[in-house]
Amino acid sequence: MELLSAAHIRKAFRSGGVKVHAVRDASFSVSEGEIAVVIGKSGAGKSTLLNILGGLLAPDEGEVKLCGVIYTA
Ligand SMILES: Nc1ncnc2c1ncn2[C@@H]1O[C@H](COP(=O)(O)OP(=O)(O)OP(=O)(O)O)[C@@H](O)[C@H]1O
Ligand SMILES: [Mg+2]
């Protein structure tokens, strides 16, 4: 059974007049009993993605679904 999914998540920040694409079109799903890890170099967008999955940050685009409840940008 699917517990968590992300569909086409995007998030950009403005930093000093420059647009930084922290997460570009991230999609995945995690099922019951599965263990998922997020890996990537510093600045790849791991914390941004996890903050979006945890509801601490709103994505610019995309959808997070947690236990059947959809959170849309
Ligand atoms: N609040 C913010 N304002 C501006 N830019 C940000 C903000 N948060 C993150 N960024 C930028 O977005 C990109 C992704 O940052 P993020 O912190 O998600 O990376 P990370 O993979 O968690 O890095 P680390 O491994 O160093 O923790 C980086 O270029 C970062 O500078
Ligand atoms: Mg981080």
Image: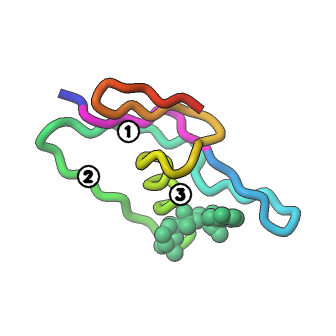
Q: Is residue 28 left or right of residue 10?
A: left
Residue at 43 percent of width and 26 percent of height? 70
Amino acid type of the residue tagged 3 in the rendering: Thr
Residue labelled with disc 1: 28
Q: Which residue is mark 2?
A: 36
**Real-space CA distance between mark 3 and mark 1, rounded to the nearest whole angstrom:** 15 Å
Pick out the residue farthest to the front: 56
- The magenta segment is 3-10
- Badge 2 or badge 3: first in the primary sequence: 2
Residue 22 position within the rendered picture, expressed as x and y whole percent measured from the top left: 62, 57
Name which residue type carries label 2.
Ala
Q: Is residue 64 magenta?
A: no
What residue lies at 11% left-to-right and 42% top-to-bottom?
33
The quadrant of the picture showing ligand 1 is: bottom right
Q: Is the CB of the residue bearing disc 3 within 8 angstroms of ligand 1?
A: yes
Q: Quadrant of the C terminus?
A: top right
Residue 57 point in image, percent of width and height: 56, 50
Of mark 3 and mark 1, the one earlier in the sequence is: 1
Q: Position of residue 63 (x, y in %)?
A: 50, 31
